[in-house]
Amino acid sequence: MKRLARIGFVLLAALTLTAWASAQNLVIAQGTDAVTLDAHDVTDSPTASIVSHMYETLFELMPDGSIEPHLAESYEVSDDSTVWTINLREGVTFHDGTPMTAEVVKGSMDRFLDPDNAFTFRFLLDRIDEVVVTGPLQIELRLATPFAPLLAHLTHNTTAIVLPSAVEEYGEAFGENPVGTGPFQLENWDRGSRIDMVTYENYWGDVPAIDGVSFLAVPENTTRMALVESGEAHVAVRVPPQDIARLNAAPDITVENVSSLRTIYMYFNHTLEPFDDVRVRQAFNYAVDKQEIAEFVLGGAVRPSDAAIAPGIFGYTDVGEYEYDPERARELLAEAGFEDGLSTTLYSPSGRYLQDIQITEAIQSQLAEVGIDATIETLEWSAYLDKTREPAGENDVPVALLGWGTVTGDADYGLYALFHTSQHVPDGSNRAFYSNPVVDDLLDEARVTPDPSVRESLYADALQIVRDDAPWLFLHSETQLVAVNDAVEGLVIHPTERVLAWNVTVSE
Amino acid sequence: MTDATTDATAGAANAAPAGKPPARWRKRLRRNPLAALGFGIIGFFLINVAFAPFLAPYDPAAQELRTTYLPPGTGVSLGGPDGEFGLWVSPATRSPIGGVSVDEGEAYPVQWFVRGERYEWLGGTITSDLKLFGVDGPVRFHLLGTDEQGRDVLSRLIHGAWISLFIGLISVSIGVGVGVPLGAISGFLGGAFDIIVQRVVDVMLAFPGILLAIVLVATFGTGLANVMIAVGIASIPVYARLVRGSVLSVKSREYVEAARAMGKGAMPTLFRHVVPNALAPIIVQSSLQMAIAILFAAGLGFLGLGARPPQPEWGLMLARGREYLAVAPHVATFPGLAIVLVVLGFNLVGDALRDALDPRG
Amino acid sequence: MFQYTLRRILIALPAIFGVIVVVFAMVRLAPGDPAVMLAGEFADQATIERIRERFGLDRSMPEQFLTFVSNLAQGDLGRSTRTNRLVTEDLAQFFPNTLELALGAILVALAIGIPAGMLSAIKRNTWVDAAVTFVALLGVSMPVFWFGLLAILFFSVELGWFPVAGRGSFAHLVLPAITLGVSSTAIIARMTRSSMLEVLDQDYVRTARAKGVQARSLIAKHALRNALVPVVTIGGLEFGRLLAGAVLTETVFTWPGVGRLLVDSILARDYPVVQGAVLVIAISFILVNLLVDLVYGVIDPRIRYD
């Protein structure tokens, strides 16, 4: 059978090589199709991967966490930190030949900021009062108050520069007719199935070595992995942990393991008993063996959390893991008056995050060992989001699994919306109804402090308090498992969960 | 997924009371080997439901993350260390990245009637720890392997049997309970009521196959209870059409007219004289509907709209198992086989009943 | 005939309208808010409000319904709340794919089902008949997604004969068409069998047989033609069912069809697309049934429409 399979692979590879690879086209299989190709309107990472090949941002978050100018050439910040002057790169053109000017950039940013457009990520830049053109290739961003994370926010893929005249021309259909400055341009979009892009020959930077890149939409894990095994795709994202060993054993495939900026946790609803008691929350943290889950449920592919945000994010500090200690958990429960145990419900999505329901089931069985009787409730994603963001008083979800990707690479985005008192749902995303005035002050101050080292220590303090208050059951930060054919060189698997083929070469 | 076998009218609809049909039917059924097979499968299925805690070697929810994805019969050898007869099991563990390792130095015999975990049976009236088979020792015997949480697949299948039975029974009850009276009254009374009912049925039938169930589940929200209701509702129009047809065909028969002429009310006449005549196709349809309901529920589970983890519902087990198809094909294969078997059982019986009850044969 | 067609269409109209109302109301009654869904884990209340406004979700249900119906009358199904694409464009892209798959499946079903059914009828009450019956029932008892997954695992991954997923060449169509066609094959086989048996029992066939007409030519000349009339009907009905029943097959094989579009839209609470997809499936199902009736009249002249 195995030999037969091998022969089959060779035959199939030969067939597909003539069809795809001969044109040096990189084929990437993702779980879903692009939702839209309007860069401002993107909300999910598979779409962000695709759109990042056609559009570019002013600044670029490098995989190592540093920030480099990209469409911008340089920038200056005024002494009071409220005016940001940005000098734009010269010689950048859009796919239709239009040169990028300060006017164009202003037009793009104004569109992103227009409340009527209701872009989900508008809040990233909503501190900007006004975008002013001060030269043919210079703009000023004027803010009412200092906002330290701005630079990080300008690296987010939704803030990419689109061509305003194309937006006008295509109107509502702009999402299918992208015009950006990126190294690839859209050739064909077979909805629900595949997107083909070809290299943009007049790209301002290094023109890609490959002729094009295609993204296939393959929701079934088994099928997606089979595509890369059979050679029909060069790259497949979201490798299920249990497939790592098998794929690595294949002669021409390597599973890349790149950490992501996404943290997975279960939050406790502080408005509900017994989770208003810090001892109970800590008991949960001690009762769960994060190492075992990381190793056996996730194939060793994740990193147990030692802070509320992942390493690689500006502001991260190791504030210490909750070591697995069921004895300590039982003691804390007894102190809190639950020596006979307690029962609760764990809410979990199914299929949203890597092995989410499997993690919840493992937690359920580990909690049982310290006398916590937990039942599991799963809802489909839309109902789940809805139910977990009901206001205090109506919200009856006690414990729920969620993930948060700090895609700006700056702790503000990862902490403010989740732990600040002003951000209780439904106003923000603080679903735990966590509230600590000290943390609030630290987060507020870090927002307006320009000095990075001061900010870093503010966040370190905040992270330490959050760790001790245990508003979450800290689990792990995710890892991106991507199966890559060994013929591919130069693929970037970005911590923001994007796969970038800008500098790829494919050997024969 | 299919609602194809819904066509129970294919002959039985016109069944009229004549002679001693039950005897004739029984004789015909007995001659049909496929019917015997079908009844056998259903019987086996019911035994599983009834004696689940005794038959299942382990707790279906007991997890062991260090023995996940064990292939069927891992660590099992024929014959003991000193050449003894019988099945012997050695401890097996899985390392996260590598594979399964079996410690063949230790071996324990698989025995009939062993003591295992305590369980309650028949609503707590019986408490026991007797299991049909198992290993008396510090190892576990996974006849059908383990799943992604290290749970015993066989135990989950056995404990999940009642869920499938329930899905079938509840959905059929809803279909019969609403569809039969609706169809009967509609056919018997005629007029505006009939027209309205038929138009509603038209709308429901315009959602072919599993589509109606999908739309209903999306509306009610996912979950097992809603799946049962949705699949039940989706079967209402089939019953309504079926019963209306047979009611129309017997409505004008003499004994019905006679009953009406004797001053009996419409409803008593309907349910005493008319509906019983539609019984044969209803029975046939219900057997087929059991099959359809189980398949639909599995399909909804597959789409992420059905039962919720960690329930050992077969469709959900299959849907979960498909994620591991490449590394551990047994996790999806056995629930799939279980579904096929039970659905086949009901289809065989339904098919045989249809032949047996066919008045033309 | 024309009058009959017209009447059937008129009868179908209320059903279609009912479908519209039902779908419109149901997707909105479903728990889960499309605006929250679009905004994701990140959203604050203000963003959600703006999104709600952008897609008109803040208006009352009757108001939304009136807009929907009046737009529908102009052939406008609105725009997807998820992708902002015209729903009509989405459907124009996805529906032909489903049609292709359903056509492939019905061809498989007819090509295998009719001969199997005939064989079964001719060898009535032998082990051949029992075997065909058993296999046919096994076919309808198989969860299609399970069959599809096993087929991928064996024929694509293990043997490498067919592509794993997607749409494009003829090779892409083979496995999905067979998978989707399994249950229809079984049904058509069963139907062919019973219809053949009925014809074989009829007087003229018996007479012909008594006259010494060879069994084979008898079956070819008389029985088959008459027996196929109900088979055509069931084939047509099956085709209609396949159009809608392709959801699961499409999911397994990543076939960009209207069924998958529907399920994705339901999960995303993308109301306009759900409405459009259900409408298209329901209408095509009703049309196929109508067509079957008309064809039935053409091949069986005993049926009269008046």
Image (spheres, helix red, strand yellow):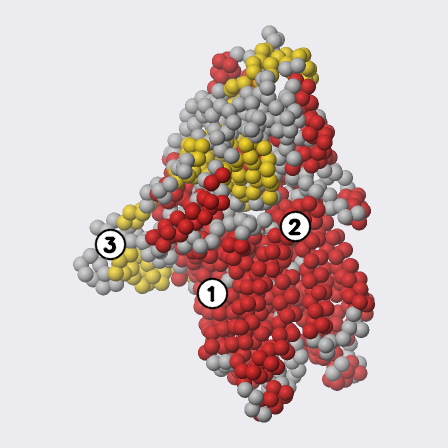
Instruction: Please name the residue shown 45% across and 32% down the image.
Output: A505
Drawn side of residue A395 relative to residue B75, left or right = right
Q: Are marks 2 and 3 on the same chain?
A: yes
Disc 3 crowd rating (10 Å Cα; few below 14, some 14-19, many 20+) is many
Left or right: C98, with C57 as reference point = left
The amino acid type, in three-letter code, at marker 2 is Thr
Report whether residue A355 is seen.
no
Q: Chain of mark 3?
A: B
Residue C136, percent from left and from top? 52, 69
- Kindly identify which numbered label has been placed on residue B107: 3
Looking at the image, tell me whether mark 1 or mark 3 is earlier in sequence order.
Answer: 3
* Residue A188 can be seen in this image: yes
| Residue B92 percent across, percent down from the top left | 30, 49
- Which residue in the structure is indicated by mark 2? B219
- Which dot marks residue B18? none
Element under disc 1: helix
- How many numbered circles does the render carry? 3
Q: Spatial distance from mark 1 to mark 3, Cα to Cα?
A: 34 Å
Q: Give above or below for B350 relative to C265.
A: below
* Category of crowding for the residue at label 1, using alpha-carbon neighbours closer than 10 angstroms: few (below 14), some (14–19), many (at least 20): some
Q: Earlier in the sequence, mark 2 or mark 3?
A: 3
The secondary element bearing badge 2 is classed as: helix
Q: Chain of mark 2?
A: B
- Point 44% across, 68% down: residue: B44
Task: Give the amino acid at mark 3.
Answer: Ala
